[in-house]
Image: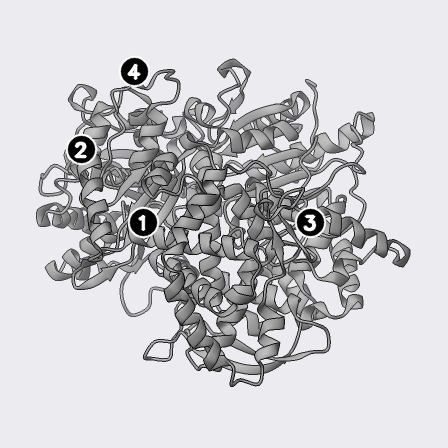
Amino acid sequence: MENLKFPAFPYKPYTIQVDFMNALYRFLENGGVSMLESPTGTGKTLSIICSALQWVVDRKKRGKLDMTDESDKVIGNDNQIGSDDEPDWMKNFVINKDDQALERKIKKEKFKFGLKKHEKQQNRESFRVLFSRDLEEEELHAKKESEDLQNRNDEEELTDEFLLEEYESEEEGALSGGKSKRKAGGVSVGSSSDEEEEENGSDEEKEGLKVYFCSRTHSQLSQFIMELRKTSFTNAIKVVCLGSRKNLCINKDVLRLGNTIHINERCFELQKKKKNAISKIRNVDAEGTIRQSKASCGCPMLRKHKLHRQFKNKISQQGAMDIEDLVSLGRNIGTCPYYGSRSIFPVADLVVLPYQSLLSKSSRESLGLDLKNNIVIIDEAHNLADSLTRMYDAKVTLSQLENVHHNIEKYFRRFRSLLGPGNRRYIQTFMFLTKAFLQVLLNNNDADYLNTCRETEKTLGVKPTSDFSMAINDFLFSLNIDNINFFKLLEYIRESNIIHKVCGYGDKMASLQKELMVDADGKSSEEASTLSSFRAFVDFLLSLTNNDGDGRIIISRARLMASEKQAGSLKYVMLTGQKIFSEIVDQAHAVILAGGTLQPIEETRERLFPWLPSNQVQFFSCGHIIPPDSIMPVAVSQGPSGRCFDFSYSSRNSSTMIEELGRLICNLVTVVPEGIVVFFSSFEYEDQVYEGWKNSGILARMSKKKCVFREPRRSKDVESVLTKYKEKIDKICNGERGVVVQNGAILLAVVGGKISEGINFSDGMGRCIVMVGLPYPNPADIELLERIKHIEGIGYSNSTELLVTDDYHSGDVHDGFSLLRRCRRRGKEYYENLCMKAVNQSIGRAIRHINDYAAILLVDSRYVQESSKRSFSHPVNKLPQWIKDRLVSAPMKYGEVHRLLSQFFLSKKSVVSQRVEK
């Protein structure tokens, strides 16, 4: 293995690229978990492609490929609530007609769910007592609404369409648990994610070893495909790029909805329409306006099988295609690229997909991804642990709970007399749960509730209006719902199709009674979607089935703030990713974590794969390809007027600090050519600084030299701003200065925003990167505090060993700092690492190739402060080695910094001139 060659690499590789490819090849041969760190701009993606795919080719040649028998593998999700959302014709696309009856039989057996048989008698009695008090009132409502509906001609139609099938539970004597006397079905309601679907119905033969490559964003996946096209593998292997409906849908009527949730729901609805039927559909466009139109049922992009076959053939002929290519091809042919790409991946050698599709178990199983003995490569893995756990968070808002409660209560009043005892019992359980959750969030005058609030305040030491957290078991006990079998309840949801019956009836009544959920301006809010509300509610119920120590419940009560109501919410925060990640590691032959800044690797190991000893985690790290004199990293502790820079929480808001920063930028625009990118800790602080500069006249001064651009809050507007910024830089580089004498542009950006993740500022777009302060996360964030407490507890066998107690925090900054001071090691290091990983991601945007050059200014006295004077470790120690080795960190006045910058850019200007002459 010493003389490995990678002929697919399109250029003569640098030494560090060869080292990287050799290391990756060796790690793939060994299998297991590996981590490879290579700075941005070193050709990491190209090295991954050439090494990983070469290993696959070589392994096939050696005949060592382990051909796994797929005949016994059942792809399904026992924990996912929903059913197959694939179009019927696609599921049977390659199935012979003689096999269709057998397939239907298998599917029918697959979706039969049974309820658990062991339910305590006291639970049954508690439910009877629980709802007996409201029966008389509910009967009156039911009688009144029944009389109103008797006059309608479609009474019988409503009953046939929306009445639940009889459901027998063990209370009614069923021998094998709960059972619905009908076919199982329904649309997935288990997640609101745009990647949440049921299993892929294609039965195409899966061929050989697969490589799954995933990254954080669709733009990063497109960059991967661009790099793949540079190699000979682009036409030698079968490649498919998977994406979300929002990115791949070409149905204009559906895309007009704008919102991801609405797009997913409309796609589901179109597939449920019966053939040759005509219906009135209600569309909510991106502005929220409701429009009704007649439309033939079913999506027009899924009707013609021949077009789908043509789409598949084109992909096979054209090689690697990214999301944009798939959309363009789908539009040209007139067929759906979303389902077209999904039907191809079973036979693909390389599958390129977003984080959510691979890392979420429900998404993997809904797509039919088989990781067994295959290769998983996770790029941009610097924050993998947090990204993984956040996928399993679940949040339901006050308005969503109200929506669910209103609709299910209305359904129960209407059909109660017609429902069987099993259905009645479960629907009553729904109403009890929604009422209990609402009482937690609402500040009302109910005497019992107020007593509960007072008891909560007395017991937990928090005010009823504050945000606080609870363990799952404590939450269940406090609401007196610990005797509810949530597994059984979720099975009922999956089996009975209750969600779509209730949603369908609610929508029908709203249209008949002209009670559309629209505000005074004729707009419809995202929260108004009944199905979305049920999705969120069921997600939260599902989270309550997790182990008590796996996460926390964050309770945010509704309250008035600045004369506006702040909506309350219940949120489950997943804290541990160990079990989630082990499901991937146990199946795959090798799992590769790649990124520009992966260190410290020990934190990642402890949170994701602690069962692996440190010496068994394969790790590789390399330096940068650029010469040492191509970057000028400087720690700037003083401004032009001599003021010490301190952007800590207590000092950053002062007008003197903001003005001193403005004077620094005004000096930089005179010495730095082309583009300057300034990173702030948050959008709120960037707003404050911008307004301060504007009011003081500093903004006008710097605008005379460079045009100022700002990162927009909305992601969809980022591309437009970047385009204008780049056009301005290009004009300067081409000598087109225009009437205004400007020498470039400034881009004000935010750490953790769209621009700091995955956007490259090569050459003139980033000649100087300015990092303002240390972007520590907000210590008042209760979710962050829960993560810190959990991480601090890793490795302790006894909770009494911890200095950090299980206190409840109300979002106070001082409470957060107090908790951090009590941390021994892990919690504090996690907090520091969040900050410095964000810094490293941002400042690494500048250098993209071997001839690039840039200055990096770390503006804060804490970058040069002695460690003995600090509460945390020195931030410089957590910088990438290739920056730390060249950092000028000695305290100096700004005049010296200005001189160093002038010399640096003058020397680079002469080097570029000589290169052009040659």
Where in the figure is residue 756, as x and y percent of width and height? 38, 46
> In front: 719, or 805?
805
| Nearer mark to the viewer, of 4 and 3 | 3
Q: Quadrant of residue 894?
A: top left
User: Dot 1 surroundings within 10 Å: few (below 14), some, or many (20 or more)?
Assistant: many
Q: Are marks 4 and 3 in contact (CB under 8 Å)?
A: no
| Nearer mark to the viewer, of 2 and 4 | 4
Mark 2, secondary structure of its residue? helix
Residue annotated with mark 2: 861
Quarter placement of the N terminus: top right
Q: Residue at x 18, y 35 (%)?
A: 815
Which amino acid is tagged 1?
A: Val
Residue annotated with mark 1: 750
> In front: 225, or 479?
479
Which amino acid is tagged 4?
A: Glu
Residue annotated with mark 3: 111
What is the spatial separation of the Cα atoms under label 2 and label 1, in whole angstroms?
20 Å
Relative vertical location of residue 53 with respect to residue 564 in this rendering, above or below: above
